[in-house]
Image (spheres, helix red, strand yellow):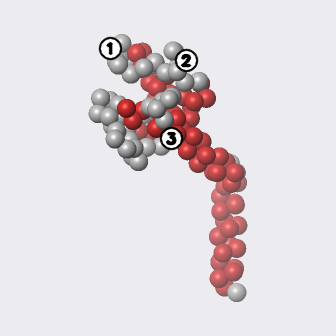
Amino acid sequence: MRKTFRVLSIAVSALALTGVLGIAPTAIADDKSALEKGKKLAFGIKKGNCLACHMMSDGDQPGNIGPPLIAMKARFPDKAVLKAQISDARAKNPNTIMPPFGTHGILTEKEIDLITDFVHSL
């Protein structure tokens, strides 16, 4: 009986917390799904291909041309700055070899958002 009450209490607390934070349980699942989509784009050789130049966790045979993508929340506290960097790195460094993914239409705005969310989570 006590175990059932404890489990029920935890479940109610979790629901209350998500309500206070304004996070629906499905939003958490959607976030995971979006991160997986962003990872797939970032790791895929047909679109993002971030691993060609960057080391990232879970990446096989990463490149070393670009900086390692670690501690991204600390390096880019403002996610919009990271998105701008992914979209067109030439704005900050005109001599970069990073492709202007957004400007040249390599990635759609939605794909850039997904990759930005994934990279920011690293």
What's under tag 3, amino acid-wise?
Lys
Look at mark 3 in the image and give the residue it sits on: 39
Q: How far apart in space, not on screen, are marks 3 and 1 (Cα)?
A: 27 Å
On-image quarter of the C terminus: top left
Left of 15 or right of it: where is 43?
A: left
Q: How far apart in space, not on screen, are marks 2 and 1 (Cα)?
A: 19 Å
Q: Residue 51: percent from the left, percent from the top?
A: 39, 35
Q: Residue 92, located in which quarter of the rendered image?
A: top left
Q: Secondary structure at mark 3?
A: helix
Q: Which mark is residue 74?
A: none
Task: Check the image and report above or below for 57 versus 103.
Answer: below
Sequence-first tag of 2 and 1:
1
Q: Residue 107, located in which quarter of the rendered image?
A: top right
What's under tag 2, amino acid-wise?
Gly
Q: Is residue 21 visible?
A: no
Look at mark 2 in the image and give the residue it sits on: 105
**Which label sits in the foreground, 3 or 1?**
3
**Which label sits in the foreground, 2 or 1?**
2
Question: Is there CB contact under 8 Å for labels 2 and 1?
Answer: no
Sequence-first tag of 3 and 1:
3
Choose between 5 and 51: the one closer to the eye: 51
Look at mark 1 in the image and give the residue it sits on: 95
Choose between 36 and 20: the one closer to the eye: 36
Q: Secondary structure at mark 2?
A: loop
Question: Is there CB contact under 8 Å for labels 2 and 3?
Answer: no
Task: Check the image and report above or below for 31 versus 18.
Answer: above
Q: Secondary structure at mark 1?
A: loop
Question: Is there CB contact under 8 Å for labels 3 and 1?
Answer: no
